[in-house]
Image (tube, rainbow, N blue to C red):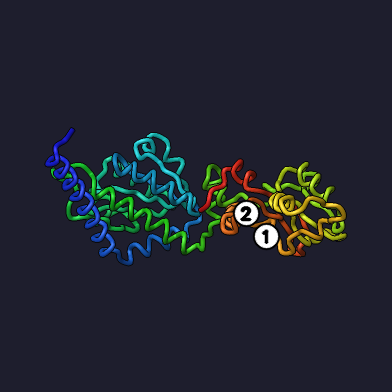
Amino acid sequence: MPTMNHSEQYLNWARDVLETEAKGLHEVAASLNEDFVRAADAVLACTGRIVVMGIGKSGHISRKVAATLASTGTAAFFVHPAEAAHGDLGMIVDGDLVIAISNSGESDEIAAIIPALKRKNITLVCMTSRPGSTMGRHADIHVTVAVSQEACPHGLAPTSSTTAALALGDAFAVVLLRARAFTRDDFALSHPAGSLGKRLLLRVADLMHTGDELPAMKLGTPLKEAVVCMSEKGLGMLAVVDEKKQLMGVFTDGDFRRLFEKRDSFSGLRVDDIMHLQPKTIHEEKLATEALKKMQENQINGLLVVNEHNILVGALNMHDLLVARIKQA
């Protein structure tokens, strides 16, 4: 186990790294100019795809930038520059825009394909720390991403520079997202799987019980019949509707238990006599997460689902949301 001195030393080293990289981000933010604006406008005006490339650590950053762009409304993909030199250049076609990332601006693999790229009707955007580099000179638009110091004590391992390039890629993505008025629903279309997709896409109508599964009885129903119906449907509640299926009230298993404690006889009771007149409801087109929030806020286990005319169309309870793995945002 490290001694206290070791522990303190490790923490100091870690803080130095974070502070150095944070300083680099501030430097890049301060240096942003019209070149960034020109690059963003070029991406928005692009009629083709956005192709992102880089080699080494910049290659890893480029993959992430392409993925972030693609998931936020800008059609983008990564092309390895070395593979591009051996045939994958055919993936880049007229009308595309290429974003090439390199700290030095002298990446041999990218420099080797620049002449071929320039023969295509594409826009070349280069992100480097040196506007006068090979990539900087040949770029249609050059965006400077320079930091004064790497976090590596030897100044060798790409640390502050890669963090800055990654952050600038995020800046591009978010600027483009906002310029396109990209919405949460748009985002969900690119993320249908997992909890994120469910949180953004799954609606009440996708989960609610309908038809024969719907626990509902008309006004005037004897209490005994209502309790039997509620028990058979297994949702812990019963909707009370009129002849036109408009929702009039709700009766829950908790209501029945409380009634059982107070009375020995239920003769002559109808569901109208004990129902709640203002049941908690939700519209069928609402997100499932909104149903969960409403249940939690009102400390209830179920909701009745209505349309815009207050017609009962479904019901769901907390168990349905748990089975679907719906979690609060």
Name the residue beneath numbered marker 1: 280
Query: Amino acid under label 1?
Result: Lys
User: Residue at 78% of width from left, 41% of height from top?
Assistant: 232
Is residue 248 found left or right of 298 in the rendered image?
right
The residue sitting at the bottom extreme is: 34
Is residue 224 found left or right of 119 in the rendered image?
right
Between 59 and 287, the residue placed more toward the observer is: 287
Name the residue beneath numbered marker 2: 300
Q: How many marks?
A: 2
Relative image position of residue 151 (x, y in whole percent): 19, 48
Relative image position of residue 75 (x, y in whole percent): 49, 50
Between 259 and 150, the residue placed more toward the observer is: 259
Is residue 233 found left or right of 145 in the rendered image?
right
Q: Are marks 1 and 2 in contact (CB under 8 Å)?
A: yes
Relative image position of residue 303 (x, y in whole percent): 67, 54
Mark 2 burial class by Cα count in 10 Å: few <14, some 14-19, many 20+: few
Query: Amino acid under label 2?
Result: Ile
User: Residue at 23% of width from left, 56% of height from top?
Assistant: 24
Secondary structure at badge 2 equals loop
Q: Quadrant of residue 108?
A: top left
- Mark 1 or mark 2: which comes first in sequence? 1
Relative image position of residue 27 (x, y in whole percent): 23, 60
